Image: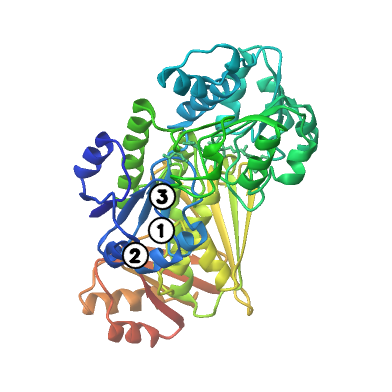
Amino acid sequence: MRVLVTESIAQSGIDMLGKKAEVDVRLKIGRDELLEIIKGYHGIVVRSATLVDSQLLKAAKNLKVVGRAGNGIDNIDLDAATQAGVVVVNTPESNSVSAAEHTIGMMLASCRNTCSANQYIKSGNWDRSRFKGNELDGKTVGIIGLGRIGSLVSSRLQSFNMKVIAYDPYIPGERFELLGVEKMEKLEDLLIRADIITVHTPRTEETIGMLGESQLATIKDGVRLVNCARGGIIEEKALYKALKSGKVASAALDVFEQEPCPDNPLFGLDNIVVTPHLGADTHEAQNKVGINIAKHVLDALEGRFVTGAVNMPSLHDKDMEYLKPYLLLAEKLGRLYYQLEKRPVSKVEIKYRGGIAEHKTGLLTLAYLKGLLEPVVKERVNYVNAKLLAKSRGIDVMESLDSAASEYTDLIEARVSNGHGAFSMAGTLFGMKELRIVELNGYKIDMEPAPHMLLVRNEDKPGVIGCIGTIMGVSKINIATMRVSRNSKGGKALMVLNVDGVVPKDVIDMVKKVDGITEVNFIKL
Ligand code: NAD
Ligand code: MLT
């Protein structure tokens, strides 16, 4: 396995990656060279400067994972990665405290003119009167984006005796209450009330330019602005004008519309404090980021379930522990359809019954789709792109839950429609580890998935089972287990034989000729 690291991460992370993979650290690599060499790598680790777009992903023929050593993923084309079946992992928790602390530091520096005073005194001057600032105490701070970092900033600012108000339409009201923060229903409500505004949203289409000229016109005179989230959320041109006019008393920026940006008209102003995207740059955060990104990347490369992947459903450990054995069952159930039917699928309905329905089952549905599609699509199918591939093939996927107990403690039922009819199957686990298919197209059965299986549909009449036994014996194919099921006495029957090797086509043809046999399939599960 080969991993390319294009931006600086902690040595602890590189060392961890190096135990399992060949690691190349290429910090100054140019775009053209990156496009040229990426096909030789299975993993890439980046921070915010490397653009992982569709062009790079197309060139990355062997890539399985993009590790974003940090939080923001605005430099990664998630849709393109998902389409290519490439897992994207990041480490959002690892640097939140550092980013929150930097925000507070920048806010204080901005309110107290710390940086200008520092420069002034170091140039051989001494004057206290020109750097008079403001206290945080008793002021109202407006937080835009009350996620991980916004929440940490909020609790820290409350200890400065600030009144905290916030705007985040995607966070439930209870969360605001829990944090002791007053919820603003509209951004405008925050803008007219806050003495200090700090932004903590991701950079998205909705947030780019969120504080532009018209918004800055509505704020209180003399507001102080802080942006340690992403460049462009506060429009730089509008900010320049507002800082110049004094509408905004001061600003503190760690992030910029263009990065790196060694020169920027804003840097010429006295009432601005700037740092070169340092929010996450502490020893503590970088160590955590390095170790955690290495763990996630190795999980993805070694085929383990990646907790916290950005383009896959995430699971808590409790859910994972319960659901893990069912992932294989769901995948094997999915594998059944195209081995028995050749008609294109239009709809898949999956029902989870019993205790399993109390867990997050989305991943099981992905496992089912992976099993269903893998044998028939040319692209790599995995948990990342299974749903997207199903959609692109016109397959409607529906999931339902019923936690009421049935005949089995847990049951996965699937119904596949193909325009001509429906195909059904159900499976469970015995003792939480033995996989069993317990229903197939209306037949109750006790079928153990195996690599060599013969599924025979026949009329329920004497002699059929004996004939098959004879054919297998003559053909030197050992039968490991045999299960039979019928829908009614003398009606239709299903026979499942687990055998010890591949059943050749001529043997299958012989079985097909037996009087009363209607269909024979050799399948692998
Ligand atoms: P998060 O996802 O936990 O929180 C973001 C919050 O923004 C969410 O609660 C979301 O609901 C809210 N939001 C999204 N769109 C919004 C909108 N239009 N209006 C109001 N709220 C909106 O993210 P986080 O971990 O708290 O990170 C916040 C920002 O900080 C991100 O942009 C991240 O990239 C950045 N960051 C910067 C540094 C740095 O070095 N300066 C370090 C870490 C994170
Ligand atoms: C992040 O999103 O994690 C920060 O921008 C910091 C970083 O990229 O290291």
Circle nearer the N terminus (1, 3): 3
Look at the numbered discs 1 and 2 and tell me whether their residues touch, using CB distance below 8 Å. yes
Q: Position of residue 29 (x, y in %)?
A: 29, 56
Instruction: Identify the amino acid type marked 2.
Output: Ala
Report helix, strand or loop for mark 3. Answer: loop
Q: Which residue is mark 2?
A: 60
Ligand 2 within 8 Å of disc 2? The answer is no
Residue 86: numbered disc: 1
The residue sitting at 78% across, 27% down in the picture is 193
Q: Position of residue 65 (x, y in %)?
A: 36, 54
The residue sitting at 51% across, 24% down in the picture is 116
Residue 49: numbered disc: 3
Question: Ligand 1, what quadrant?
Answer: top right
Residue 65: numbered disc: none
Instruction: Identify the amino acid type marked 3.
Output: Ala
The residue sitting at 63% across, 53% down in the picture is 205
